[in-house]
Image: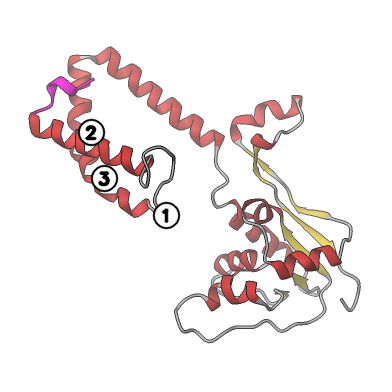
Amino acid sequence: VAWKYLATPQKILFATVFLLWLWLGYGSQVPWAYKPLYRQLQYYKPLDLGITVLLPFALACAFVHRPRIAQGILGMVVAVHLLSLAAGSRFGETAYVARELLQYAQAHPNEEFLTDAATMNGMYVVGGFQLPANVICLNGPGVEKKLLMNVEPPQTPRFHFEQRPVDGILVNLEQEYIDGFEDEFTRYLKEHPGEHVRVVAPRYRLLFLPILPFMAPRDFMVRSLGGERIPVAAGS
C-alpha cells in the first residue's frame, strides 16, 4: 500500500528483507521443495532491523494517503493473528503434559513411577532442574542420548537412575505422538499392558472449543493428547 511513497533506499531494503524471508521460509536448500534450514530461527534475526526501520514509516504513509485500505489491511492482519492463536499449535505441549504428570507424581509421594527420557527432561526443567524423587527412567541408550544431564555440558559424567520397582507408568501421549519414545520404554509398555487411566486431560484448540459440544473431536482439533497412568504389578 505504501510502496510508491518509499524512497529508493527503503524500497531496496524492503526487497532485500522480503527476498531473504522468502528464501528462508521456502526453498532454503532447493528451490523446488520445502526444505528449510535446520534450526533456522537465528537466521531470521536480520529481518528484525529491516521491519523495525520500514514498518512505522509505511504505516504512517498508508494511513495518511490511503486510510480505508490501510484500516482494512490492519483489520485483516489482526484477524489472521487472532485466528492463528486460536488455532494454536502443538509446539511445547509435550512439556505441559510433563508438568502435569510431575504434579501427579508429587501428589502421590508414596508411589514410584516410570516414564520416558524426554518426559523426564520436561519434569527436570519445570521442577527447577531437579529430578523428581519418585520418578525414574529405564537406563539404556535412550537415557544416555536424550537425558539432559547426559547431554549438556559436554564431557559430563554419565548419570544412571537407580532401578527400583515401580507402581505405575506415566505415559506422555503427546510425546508419543510427536516424537515417540526410546526403545527401552516402548518395550516396557508392551510388556505391561495394564489398564490406562487418564491423569492429564487432552487439550483442544481454542478455535474449535465452541463446536465441541455439538460434534465429536477430530484429530485436527486436538492441541494435546494429555497423559495416562498404567498400573504395574508389584515387584515389576
Kind of residue at badge 2: Leu
Q: Is residue 144 magenta?
A: no
* Residue pointed to by mark 3: 48
Q: Is residue 132 above or below residue 82?
A: below
Left or right for 28, reference 209: left
What secondary structure is marked by label 3? helix
Expressed as whole percent of the image width and height from the top left, the position of residue 100 reads: 67, 58
Kind of residue at badge 1: Tyr
* Labels 1 and 2: the sequence-earlier one: 1
- Residue nearest the observer in this picture, 185 or 96: 185
* Labels 3 and 2: the sequence-earlier one: 3
Q: Quadrant of residue 33?
A: top left
Q: Which residues are magenta?
A: 1-7
On residue 38, which mark appears? 1
Circles 1 and 3 in contact, beta carbons < 8 Å: no
The structure residue drawn at horizontal position 64% and vertical position 30%, both measured from the top left corner, is 208
- Residue nearest the observer in this picture, 21 or 215: 21
* Residue pointed to by mark 2: 55
Q: Is residue 4 magenta?
A: yes
Q: Quadrant of residue 87?
A: top right
Left or right for 11, reference 204: left
